[in-house]
Amino acid sequence: MSRSERLLDLIQCLRRHRRPVSGQLLAAELGISIRTLYRDIATLQGQGAPIEGEAGLGYVLKPGFMLPPLMFSDEEIEAIVLGSRWVARQPDRRLSAAAVNALAKIAAVLPDDLREDLDASTLLVGPSAQAIEGIDLGTVRQAIRNERKIGFLYQTAGGAASQRVVWPFALGFFDKVRVVVAWCEMRQDFRHFRADRISGLNATETRYPRRRQVLLKEWRATFDKPRES
């Protein structure tokens, strides 16, 4: 392992700990001596990394720090490229454009050798299945971010239609369909709504009364009984 890789691993290790962690524990996780750990911490601090603490007390990395230039392993680069290429092929045009832009921004700050690896990635994404959606998924994503209610007309697989007001908190992407995960006011329960069966989408400015993180946690607890509409 090169020294630059070891320094990056140390940063990543510190990120995993929200509270001060001892030098002995850090050295054990990284498989290095305590003396090497102290030298590496001093090096990172000298480069501007906001690492607080000292020997005997433990170390903690302040949140929000990004080590420039960005460093990635081969597998991390492949994951970034593959994920970005997949999103870029999705019918959500704004999300697709964002994936392309994000990859370009990452490439712009990578060292030359890693940028070449990024451009030469051989992991390819096949043609996506044609998804037919009558709504703007960007509107749904905005409602999720802002924790706002949305209304729409929904048609079930059997053809029954009903007007719904829901609290959207997640959006599932599958090969042939997108699914809005929400709390449904009519059913008073979690429901899954296929985007291709939604029409008349109405974004409101009404904030739903619970945090989306709480809804997501409670919904995950119901995985054994998923239901649609």
Image (cartoon, rainbow, N blue to C red):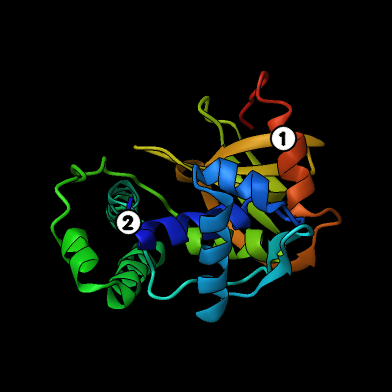
Compared with 49, 30 (above or below) is above
Q: Residue at 57% of width from left, 47% of height from top?
A: 27
Instruction: Please give left or right for residue 108 compared with residue 126 in the image.
Output: right
Camera-side residue: 67 or 197?
Answer: 67
User: Badge 2, how many Cα within 10 Å: few under 14, some, many 20+?
Assistant: few
**Residue at the spot 66% in from the left edge and 53% down from the top edge:** 23
Please identify the residue farthest to the top as the structure is shown.
Answer: 224
- Relative to 98, is 181 above or below? above
Left or right, residue 207 beside residue 27: right
Q: Could you tell me residue 152's position as x and y percent?
A: 62, 52
Q: Secondary structure at mark 2?
A: loop
Return the residue found at the far right.
209
Give the class, few, some or many, for how many residues have Cα within 10 Å of label 1's Cα (few <14, many ≥20).
many
Quarter of the image for residue 14 reads bottom right
List the residue tagged with mark 2.
2
Image spot of residue 160 (x, y percent):
59, 31
Cα gap from disc 1 to disc 2, whole angstroms? 44 Å
| Place of residue 188 in the rendered image (x, y in percent of width and height, measured from the top left) | 82, 36
- Identity of the amino acid at label 1? Trp
Q: Earlier in the sequence, mark 1 or mark 2?
A: 2
- The amino acid pointed to by label 2 is Ser
Q: Nearer the viewer, residue 215 or 42?
A: 42
Q: Nearer the viewer, residue 35 or 154?
A: 35
Tell me whether circle 1 and circle 2 mark residues in contact (CB < 8 Å). Answer: no
Quadrant of the snapshot with the C terminus? top right
Mark 1 lies on residue: 219
Q: Is residue 169 visible to us here?
A: no
Q: Tell me the residue at 33%/72% (across/down).
A: 101
Q: Where does residue 201 sit, x and y in percent of width and height?
A: 58, 58
Do we see residue 86 in this rendering?
A: yes
